[in-house]
Image (spheres, rainbow, N blue to C red):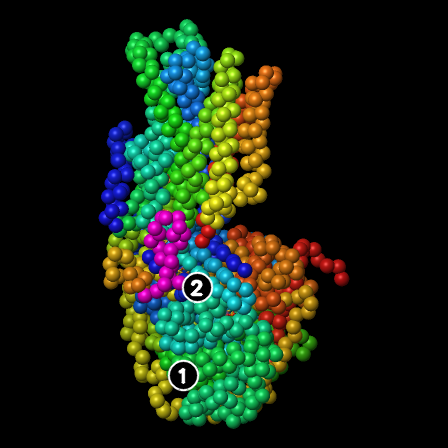
Amino acid sequence: MAIDTKKCVGCSDCVVACQTENNVPIGYCRDWVVEVMDGTYPQLEIELRSERCNHCENSPCVRCCPTGASHYADGGIVLVTKNECIGCSACIASCPYDARYVHPDGYVDKCTFCLHRVKKGMQPACVAVCPTKCMYFGDLNDPRSDVSKILKKRKHKTLIPEAGTKPQLYFLI
Amino acid sequence: MREEIIVSGRNNPLIDPLLHVWHWEIPVYLFLGGLAAGLMFFAALYTIRNRENNYKVAVQIAPMFASIALILGLGALFLDLHHKLYFWRLYTTIRLASPMSWGAWILMIVTPISFIWSALHIKSIFPNWDWKFEVIEELLEFFTKYKKVLAWIMLISSAILGIYTGILLSAFNARPLWNTSIMGPLFLASGLSAGTAMVIWISKNHDERKRFAQLDLMIIGIELFLIIHMFMGFLASTQVQIDAANLFLGGEYTASFWIFVVILGMIVPAILEGLELKGYKIPIVIPAILVLFGSVMLRIIISYAGQASRWLY
Amino acid sequence: MKSRRQFIKISSLSAAGLIFGGGLLDSLASSILKENQSYFKGPFDFTRTPTYCEVCFWKCAGWVYKDENGRIKKIIGNDDDPNCNGRFCPRGTGGVGMHYDEDRLKTPLIRTEERGKQTFREASWDEALEYIASKMKEIKEEHGPECTALFSHGSGGKYFGKVIKGFGSRNIAAPSYAQCRGPREVAFIATYGSGVNSPENTDIRDTKCLVLIGAHIGENMHNGQVQEMSDAIDKGATIITVDPRFSTAASKSKFWLPIKPATDIALLLSWMHVIISEELYDKKYVEKYTYGFDQLKAHVKNFTPEWAYGITTIKPDQIRETARTMAHAAPAVLVHPGRHVTWYGDDTQRLRAVAILNALLGSWGRRGGFYNPDKASVPHYHLPPYPKPEKTWRDAMGGKYILADLALASGVCDASIPTPDLDCSIRGWIVNGTNLINTLPDQKKTIDAIQKLDLLAVVDTMPMEITGYADVVLPECVYLERYDSLRISQGREPSIALRMPAVDPLYNSKPAYWIARELAKKLDLLEYFPFETIEEELDWELKQVGSSLEEMQKIGVKRLEREVDDLYFADGEDIEFDTNTGKIELYSTVLEEEGFDPIPVYTPHPEPSEGFYRLIYGRAPMHTFSRTANNPNLTDLMSENSVWVNPKVAKEWDLKNDQYIYLENQDGVVSDFPIKVRVTERIRWDSVYMVHGFGHADKRLKRCFGKGVSDTQMITNVMIDPIMGGTGMRGNFVTFRFDNKKTEV
Ligand SMILES: Nc1nc2c(c(=O)[nH]1)N[C@H]1C(S)=C(S)[C@@H](COP(=O)(O)OP(=O)(O)OC[C@H]3O[C@@H](n4cnc5c(=O)[nH]c(N)nc54)[C@H](O)[C@@H]3O)O[C@H]1N2
Ligand SMILES: Nc1nc2c(c(=O)[nH]1)N[C@H]1C(S)=C(S)[C@@H](COP(=O)(O)OP(=O)(O)OC[C@H]3O[C@@H](n4cnc5c(=O)[nH]c(N)nc54)[C@H](O)[C@@H]3O)O[C@H]1N2
Ligand code: SF4
Ligand code: SF4
Ligand code: SF4
Ligand code: SF4
Ligand code: SF4
Ligand SMILES: [Mo]
């Protein structure tokens, strides 16, 4: 997934859309929006980022999960199998992005890249709703996908690459 | 000026605004695991070195406390789980990359051993104990025969358990404070120290106490060395690790760490034990309890502070 | 990818079933665990019903989806809808919260104590409507039917309008005029002979240069505008933002001009000066279509960027550079007229300046400027004529504001306060979907007017402040539970959209059509409601345009063909503008006739005194005014407002981030509630900023009661626009207080 920080307006639609699509209970969220302002008046700059699980290619959460509940699914998507999760929270402690939370029902929950939608050929709920169309979702291995194309064209970054998790969420800057 | 805010008001409980997924349960679990490891390690060690009769308490009685500690520790771990009904899932898979999995399996090995060990020595406390079943007697006879082998297994597995209690945390790259290779040895040392303290506390035998006080002094020395080393490592590292170290060097956890863990949990008992060794009359429970207390605090504080340390982005 | 999978296989030496029979225990555990029905079921493809959104007035059309238990699950934009293109804004997506809000009004209420004290008893619909009808008849007998008024913002207004018009009154006002876009409409009508309307005919999508003057698109979440601004960014458009605050839009802009508030007219005049003196204007366009260029040229001769610098604090070379940038992009340039424009009382003139600047650049009627909108015409069933009232609210205005093309909510409010020289004032209000207490500036006056009334009936969905003053409260069901009139909005191509109920109304709430018709029954006005149900009316109307209710239930939105292909002016086309001169009036003959400046003039406004800061306010993308303040989904995103303070000011006052403080305005009004401080470089040091719609004072709103400060409470100085009566609300100054004890005078 690639997110254009230059177009995002921080409206948080992606957050509500995820909440209603995925039955994320009120008071919890799988994605969130960060605003970073830098500079001194009147020379200011803002970066807006819609963040969620990075579906890291080298993900500590999968590594540290004692039961295998956290696992890589098709296309490298990181998922939690609800009925295998014991709620030990190790994965939460292991995620440098704080992308996971304990669902009130006890298991750990996080962004699924809306796999249920993607499987049907739809875009993830947050991507589909975004009024600025600033999110691109697709197969990074396919050079013809929207994501691959935009990443080729634009400067981008990932979050905390130093943590060595190989995040798969790219922010266009 | 730099301003960084979450505009959508992220508010996942236990995560925001501060990560707080682990409360007292995990540090207590780690402490009890470490304590059990310490107790079992020395029991095994002196069995192998044929000093069983010199250090009766350490070899025969203390491991019974290890069994209790392990059961309580597992209890604490269980309490920490949010999805308790799926607890058994821990034992349907072995995940080498997961310290939690390791821990679960190590406990699966260590706990029965500690039970067997306790069973072997139960008659030395309760001479009239009767197992009622032939089988058990026969089994115990079998183990008595191979006690040395058992001791070796116990030695190794308890060392792994001890190191594990530290590795559980140090495996978390996401928490800069935990993410240091010193965490393993430090927690092992702390566990061993707790083990010796326990022996000092319950032993009535002067020689045994003296031996363990010497051991403890040495271990505390190692611990202090490791702590200094840890901070030096942090300060020579990246900004996030410097920030993590600063939690203890002026930050929020400074007072509690230096007072409870280092001074009360290490230096004071070390001095008291030193004095005791020099022949001063010191009620021996005091340093023993202080060491145990310091050992718990070390884990609690490291656990909490670690959750407060994070990457910047 | 492959290497990773292999890694997984190696690392997870799966020992499933090694110790326990995995599957067995699994099913045991899940049967013990209380299974929450809706969690984690593949949430898609549920039955869907069409609606158009009522969370703001952009009226996006969408689909309401339900889960397998028939509960509303989500609302998704309709791909065919030109207003939203399949994408709702956060408020529309969070509209589900309107339905689930447990603080909703549940049953009709009749007041038992003094107005303003929320003491009510529950009543039946019949009793509540009977109460209203009898009061209305009393007013009619004693004072005449024109002494009633309807305030309405939202869909139900059409039906209550029929009741009030049939009853004999034309006092129908919405706060979306005199408190919102009124000055813009009047200014554009005076210039081009036609207003901008809603959704605005701004061609943002195709513009090369977008100029935003206090229009904070991106926070102002009017869907089409936000989407098109993003498209424009994609296409490399230059954005110029004029705002005392570094808005989200400013952060997307090439130029941010942090103007001193209340000085925009000076900047606009100076831009005109540069464009005219450097001969950058569209000469052919100006010559062919405009009237009064020479007067304008003479007028702006001295308004140099150096002159404007002293007033606006914007550097002269920045003024020149931005003016040239606009001219360079012309005619695909859009000096956006904004929407909420009632700021300083000279707003019609400021918007005239905007209109004139656009004319100089030749953007009206051009691609990338303003397109020519089209609107579907749907015939209405022929009704008997409404009685002609003898008087209206205008008679109370002493001949002022005749250029206002719609009723002034503030005017109707004023007309409700009896004065010696007025034989009749308005005695009864029906208020539908507008929270006047938090919407009209000068709360004290609003409450005074209310206390003079014989009847205040409020139709609302939530126990908002206004309901606390009502004699009768009628709970309307939310938009997800009802039919309403068709959405017929203007756009590049005409379209119609249907709203139908997705679920039955919760509690004892009813739709506006039903409420209005029942009231009409009691007032013997059924002739204005010939259809017993709204379905019949909608079906009749839809059949007139070749559709039907049944078809619309399946498609939700119907796009119609444009009758003529006149989206933009053709090259050299002759155009007759609907003004006195038939031209675009740079020099306004209408304003001249009415005794106002025919060309905008800059006049200075008062400035905050020592220790005070100008209070400016705006929108947060996740809320609509006060109507979403209690919405569970949206409060989850933002639960209170904060006051933005420049770091220099914060230092002076020793204010810290997240500290709670009270505000006091120039008239000594202290905020009821404390507000969080946000120290940020994003605001000038002479102003503070907050989001409108918070600081709710009605305890029945459990989620938002006491959260933040209401800007409305701080707005006691209202600067009335002499041309059309708009209520300028940004002439208020606040200072910080650390407690809210009332000062002894
Ligand atoms: N201080 C200040 N005042 C302002 C503004 C500002 O920025 N600051 N903005 C001005 C502008 S631009 C405008 S357009 C106006 C807007 O003014 P309003 O439209 O009055 O805005 P709200 O305060 O949201 O009030 C909406 C009311 O409608 C109710 N409601 C919501 N849905 C329904 C429904 O389906 N049926 C019925 N019957 N009621 C419903 C809500 O509960 C609420 O009481 O405010 C103006 N006033
Ligand atoms: N999310 C959301 N979106 C909305 C609404 C909502 O309630 N919520 N309401 C809708 C409605 S009805 C309307 S009318 C529109 C209103 O939206 P707009 O017309 O875009 O906005 P305003 O409220 O007029 O303007 C607010 C901006 O003006 C700036 N400002 C303040 N004083 C001055 C000044 O003196 N000069 C200049 N140049 N700028 C100044 C403020 O800093 C702020 O950024 O929004 C619509 N969109
Ligand atoms: S919906 Fe789009 S524009 Fe809005 S915050 Fe999310 S990513 Fe940004
Ligand atoms: S972002 Fe966190 S939860 Fe997601 S894959 Fe990476 S480590 Fe795991
Ligand atoms: S909480 Fe669940 S998913 Fe996370 S590590 Fe523990 S078992 Fe795995
Ligand atoms: S991809 Fe789906 S699950 Fe992930 S944040 Fe977006 S909407 Fe939520
Ligand atoms: S802009 Fe948002 S709130 Fe307004 S009608 Fe559209 S979806 Fe609803
Ligand atoms: Mo408005």
- Distance, label 2 to label 1, CA atoms, is 27 Å
Q: Is residue C454 left or right of residue C560?
A: right
Which element is circle 2 on? loop
User: In the rendered structure, which amino acid carries the disc numbered 2?
Assistant: Val
Q: Residue at x 58, y 73 (%)?
A: C260
Is C40 in front, or is C279? C279
The reply to whether the magenta stretch includes residue C445 is no
Disc on res. C181: none
Q: Is residue C719 visible?
A: yes
Label 2: how many residues lie within 10 Å, few (<14), some (14-19) or many (20+)?
A: many
Residue at the disc numbered 1: C331
Q: Is mark 2 within 8 Å of ligand 3?
A: yes
Q: Chain of mark 2?
A: A
Q: Is residue C385 above or below residue A72?
A: below
Q: Are marks 2 and 1 in contact (CB under 8 Å)?
A: no
Residue at the disc numbered 2: A9
**Which percent across, then down, holds residue C299?**
56, 90
User: In the rendered structure, which amino acid carries the disc numbered 1?
Assistant: Pro
Q: Quadrant of the C terminus of chain C?
A: bottom right
Q: Is residue C193 above or below residue C2?
A: below
